[in-house]
Image (tube, helix red, strand yellow):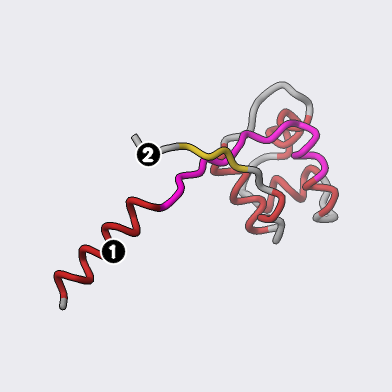
Amino acid sequence: MGFDLLILFLTQINEIEMKTLDTPTPEQIKQARKSAGLTQEGAAVLIHRKGRAWRKWEGQNHSMDLAIWELFLIKSNQLHLATYTNTMPT
């Protein structure tokens, strides 16, 4: 029985569709922040960053790391705003 479960598990893992989080645009970052009702400083504090970093992400000077973007979406209860690109496992 244990071996059968292992085979089933491995088969399911192989069938999982791999997705990669898309890099947000400065406008998406700004919209998500505003939707959360936060200032730039407040959004930065939420994800343990400085306000200066947040201003750069909204100002097109620097792309936001995907882990930071995902953290912000999770903590601001907006993960539904995330967009993904399907990728095949390598």
Asked whether 28 falls inside the magenta stretch, the response is: yes
* 5 vs 43: above or below: below
Magenta segment: 16-31
Q: Which residue is mark 1?
A: 9
**57 is higher (above) or lower (below) than 75:** above
Q: Disc 2 marks which residue?
A: 89
Residue in front for this viewpoint, 21 or 66:
21
Q: Residue at x 70, y 45 (%)?
A: 44
The spot of residue 81 in percent (x, y) is 71, 50
Relative to 88, is 90 on the left or the right? left
Residue 33, x across and y down, in percent:
79, 47
**What is the CA distance from the residue labelled 2 to the residue labelled 1?**
17 Å
Residue found at x 67% / y 40%: 50
The numbered mark, 2 or 1, whose residue comes first in the sequence reads 1
Labels 2 & 1 near each other (Cβ < 8 A): no
> SS of the residue at dot 1?
helix
Which mark identifies residue 85?
Answer: none
